[in-house]
Amino acid sequence: MLPGEYDNRAQAELDARNGVRPAHDAVTLIIARVFTPRLGHHVYYAQEMAADDPRRVLSEQMYSFEVDDKRGIVETTYEFVEPARWRDGQLNKDVFTSVVIEDLQAEGCVLLWKRDGGRFVATHDPKVCPDPGGGVAVTQAEFSLGALTIGDYKFRKVR
């Protein structure tokens, strides 16, 4: 369900119409399932680009998911040490078979995903990385069929 192309054009257009400052940039997010044995069985490459210029890459990350009997679905997000080396990886997914842990740096805290009705909601693991919500878990990401929210960016699946 997760792989595909997403964008937040509707959010960016609404911000512009309503005079929101700072407005969200229009971003395209491509998520592709990749085979990266050193990171696990459920690994994805994610590339963010300016919606009006796919050559302007904003970020590249790897998402690794594992199922933990006690904590549920655990996501670790990785940044690339040399991002240019992996640019446009969704076009050549075989390149990710050579990824080693030295190519990556874990980003912050892991996310714990829980099913909530017809959607999945991710929060930080409070034992490892307490959220600043005064003891209340703050949603970091949310996924439902056709929609993905990361932070305050609201993406819709376009392909």
Image (cartoon, rainbow, N blue to C red):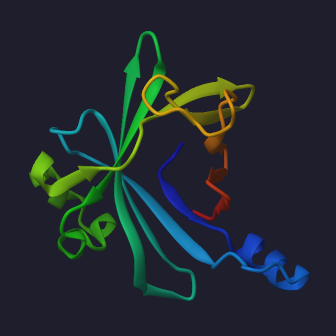
Q: Is residue 102 left or right of residue 116?
A: left
Q: Residue at x 65, y 61 (%)?
A: 155
Q: How many marks?
A: 0
**Quarter in which the C terminus is drawn:** bottom right
Which residue extends farthest top?
70
Residue 91 vertical placement versus 1 (above, below) = below
Residue 50 vs 158, above or below: the answer is below
> Residue at the location (24% across, 59% down)?
93
Which percent across, then down, holds residue 78? 31, 51
Judge from the rendering whether residue 117 lies leftward or rightward of residue 53; answer left or right: right
Q: Is residue 9 above or below residue 56?
A: above
The x, y position of residue 151, in whole percent, is 62, 54
The answer, for residue 100, to whether it is visible in the render is no
The quarter of the image holding the N terminus is top right
Seen at 21% across and 54% down, the residue is: 104
Query: Does residue 72 appear anywhere in the picture?
Result: yes
Name the spot of residue 121 as percent of width and height, x first. Answer: 64, 35
Identify the residue at the far right of this view: 18
- Residue 113 or residue 107, whichever sits in front: 107
